[in-house]
Image: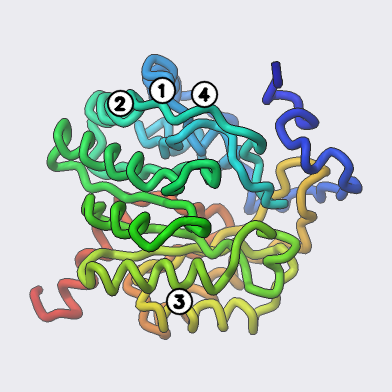
Amino acid sequence: MRDLKIPGQRHPEKAHRADNAQPKKPDWIRVKAPSSAGYKQTRDIMREHKLVTVCEEAGCPNVGECWGQGHATMMIMGEICTRGCTFCNVATGRPDALDVFEPGRVADAVKKLGLKHVVITSVDRDDVDDGGAEHFAQTIRAIRRQSPDTTIEILTPDFLRCGPDALETVVAARPDVFNHNLETVPGLYPEVRPGARYFHSLRLLQRVKEIDPMMFTKSGIMVGLGEDRQGVMQVMDDMRAADIDFLTIGQYLQPTSKHHRVDRFVTPDEFKSYEKAAYGKGFLMVSATPLTRSSYHAGDDFARMRDARAKAMGRV
């Protein structure tokens, strides 16, 4: 049996990679260890419903703050991914079969947590014909039945090996926000995201808007992987050409010595500069800070994005 707590078994595809030194984090990137009562309550609800969270699997630095407020990003379709991205701490390998009862358990947890906004993500499931599209749709519908007032944000795989109907299945389930992360600039894809294709991911998000022009779309990148400012600006332009509404930019943090190295720690002032540039390019919502992650403050940011669209359309 694999023990996913052991790095060599968690990431067998990285076992023979050369070690990359993990630099000391600057003061602005450090967070306190989670210990609040709210954190423990959220953890207990996740365990009770046998749910996986990307917060834990990806080693998110914001887990203490978010779980303390009862917010957790649920990761469906198991804890083992079929891809081996060099930045990611989610376990890789051959996943188990999809759990048909999982959508109901997710919906139960959302109701028990009393979430006004929920983020659902997943591992990549290249072993499944539709990439897990129907499983996403079932999860969205289950949450709608139990918590009709909860807004739903999904963070999906790229459905690279699927037909066009996979994306159509997910969009037809009517999530409030469709998120798919580009993760980095195209020149770094061969090293950072070798199983994916930059322009396929961009086109995926563009197609969401073609299918449902009113659905909010969202995407994010990490910085500190080796990109330069010009590359980040080009990604912003590509996203706006695809009519993406919401951009997130956060600092890449290296999970282990076998993962892609941290090229540098981007300063808070640089993040503010990216935020200003992104708003200037027409994004409805931008979150650009060292600790920004796709689902960090997602509910509050969704409300601001919705208000920004209403204002732009002259409704307020």
Which numbered disc, 1 or 3, marks the residue that appears first in the sequence?
1
Q: CA distance from mark 2 to mark 3?
A: 33 Å
> Visible in this render: residue 93?
yes
Q: Secondary structure at mark 4?
A: loop
User: Pointer 1 and pointer 2: residues touching (CB < 8 Å)?
Assistant: yes
Q: Position of residue 185 (x, y in %)?
A: 63, 72
The relative height of residue 3 versus residue 232 in the rendered view (above or below) is above
Q: CA distance from mark 1 to mark 2?
A: 7 Å
Instruction: Give me the residue at 54% from left, 42% from top.
Output: 127
Residue matched to label 1 = 46
Residue matched to label 2 = 109
Residue matched to label 4 = 35
Q: CA distance from mark 1 to mark 4?
A: 16 Å
User: Pointer 1 and pointer 4: residues touching (CB < 8 Å)?
Assistant: no
Quadrant (top left/top right/bottom left/bottom right) for the N terminus: top right
Which numbered disc, 2 or 4, marks the residue that appears first in the sequence?
4
Question: What amino acid is at disc 1?
Answer: Met
Q: How many C-alpha atoms fall within 10 Å of the one at disc 1: few (<14), some, or many (≥20)?
A: many
Front residue of 271 and 194: 194
The relative height of residue 167 versus residue 237 in the rendered view (above or below) is above
Question: What amino acid is at disc 2?
Answer: Ala
Indicate which label's residue lies in the foreground, 4 or 3: 3
Indicate which label's residue lies in the foreground, 1 or 4: 1
Instruction: Give me the residue at 17% from left, 39% from top.
Output: 144
Report the side of 231 relative to 208 (left or right). Answer: right
